[in-house]
Amino acid sequence: MPSESTAGRPADRGRGEVGLRKLLEANRTFDADTTALPTQPISTIARDHRPQAPQPTPPGDQQLVKRIGIAVGAVFAVGTAAYLADLALNVGEVPRGVVVAGVEVGGMDQGEADAKLRSVLGPRADQPLPVRIGDVQASMVPSAAGLGIDWDATWDAVGGQPLNPVGRLVSLFGTRDVPVSSTVDNAALDQQLSTFRTHDNPTVEGTVRFENGAPVAVPPVPGRVLDIDGARSTITERWAEVSLLDLPVVAAPVEVRTEAVQAALRDIATPAVASPITLAAKDTRVALTPEQIASVLSFVPDGNGGLAPQIDNDAVIGLLGPQVVTTEIEPKDATFTVGAGKPTVVPAVVGEKIDWAKTLEKLPALLTQPGERAFEAVYQRIEPKLTTEAAEKLGINETIGEFTTGGFSGPSGVNIRTVAAKVNGAVVKPGDTFSLNGFTGPRTAAEGYVESGIIDKGRPSTAVGGGISQFATTLYNAAYFAGMEDAGHTEHSYYISRYPAAREATVFDGAIDLAFRNNSEHGVFIQAIATGSDITVRLWGTKTVDVESITGEKTKPTEPTEITLPKGKDCIASEGAPGFTISDTRVITDRKTGQQISRHTRTVKYDPIPIVKCE
């Protein structure tokens, strides 16, 4: 008799019974002869296959279905109970089968498992870890390489109890390896990897070198180097779980083929040093000997597996240049000389210099040429900065400013005469600025300057080039009265009686300069004449202005202080002198019209010269 749960759904029950009956009938049908043809008309067959009313399931089949349902339900119930019991029993425990960096913690209480991992894995960070790089043994201390264990991330990777029944079942029969999650100081790890790189076997590239002037083949040898990216991954992932860390290496291939080395030796290197190569420079002949050719010739990969010859042009120039320098002509600017009270143009000289770039273009082809080998120097024309024609148009024909100072002797005189010879003949074009330091360059012993007196930090002293300030003062005054524009000058800190007050200048190599700008429409030629006791600087050009200097009165006197220093060469006694303030006014007027062009006053404060006693 149907139960209450099924009695209310007869249609559902009917459909189920019909389905089961059809399965049973189908089974019986396969036992019959399925090849028999129908013996009744098609229309009759069609009527026989019209939908039939549901037939009741035989009682035996109903019992079979019930037994199957009960069995499946029982199995499911038992499995569910077992699953729930297993899940309940393992609450708070590490999932079964978990192995962290080689340490088994599966099934353990999570607190106990954490303590075990920390006690076993924690110390490994500070212990030397053997490392193998190819066939090389090395070691590292993980903590020194910037590595540590990120415990939270490691436990996150372990995860909690799996809810998947299949996963829980599988965990009964296997293990799950979980690597530690590392903290990484990339800078420290990079340093460790750089240390490991010292064990690389670099590639030996095939080439040809020269030994005692003879060519020798160097066969190519592939290298083996650390795989940096692979090593980084291996270290960060496995350092805590192994007793020997194998780091990956990669092959470093060669570029040059062995047969290419032999070809370069046979076809280029050997004939290159078979005989000298001669350079013809005008009437001069100089040779590159076979030994010198070997010293400037090398071979580099050509990018296609072969070798290309390479000549060190700078080395060739160093060998040949000094021998042919006499064939070159240095360019010289036009300048002026003074005779019979009037300047005349000294013609410029056009230079001729060897164009080494073009000259040496011919050398590579000669390396493999048999017999006598020679090439010619190619010269290039070097125009002077100031040509003869340009100098003649500068309008340099009369004195426009002149000044003389004296009272020097000894070492100061040597330096003054040296700098005067250097500056004499300088030409300043319209609009250009003349710098004394820039024109002379460093004034050192190599240029003929000697040690003489200077003022250093308020006290008398000595230095190479001392005394040049007297030349600077003389030049400044000549430019002053020529009406040149002051482009920068500095007075002495102390007043020196042989110089005009507030109208003098000092210089110091690389620090204090004297400069003036030619603000006229004509060129300026500087003539410097030095004798044993005085120096005259005369500026030539076209005189268009008159200059007047008005010196003011001394004011605001200051008394000197007294300094006592130990006796010795560093102590220079001085009687001292008072300081004061004074001004100078320059008035410039147009020579033709008499109209004032400018009026400028400069006020200078001179410090008192200390009284220095040496005791």
Image (cartoon, rainbow, N blue to C red):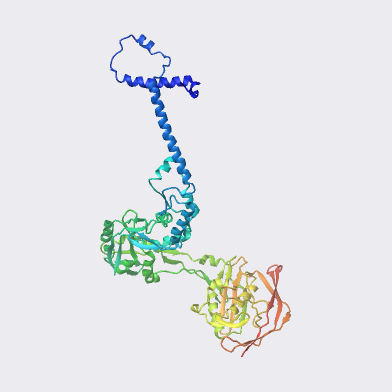
Task: Report the front residue among 84 and 161.
Answer: 84
Q: Position of residue 208 (x, y in %)?
A: 30, 62
Task: Report the front residue among 422 and 338.
Answer: 422
Q: Position of residue 203 (x, y in %)?
A: 33, 59
Residue 292 relative to residue 99: left or right: left
Task: Report the front residue among 383 and 509.
Answer: 509
183 lies above or below 547: above
Give the image quarter of residue 278: bottom left
Q: Furthest-bottom residue in view? A: 615
Q: Position of residue 501 (x, y in %)?
A: 68, 79
Residue at point 61% right, 70% down? 516
Q: Do we see residue 12 in this rendering?
A: yes
Give the image quarter of residue 207: bottom left
464 lies above or below 166: below
Q: Position of residue 315 (x, y in %)?
A: 37, 67
205 lies above or below 475: above
Q: Furthest-front residue in view? A: 1
- Number of disc labels: 0
The quadrant the C terminus occupies is bottom right
77 lies above or below 525: above
Give the image quarter of residue 557: bottom right
Q: Do we see residue 164 in this rendering?
A: no
Residue 7 relative to residue 290: left or right: right
Task: Report the front residue among 232 and 364.
Answer: 232
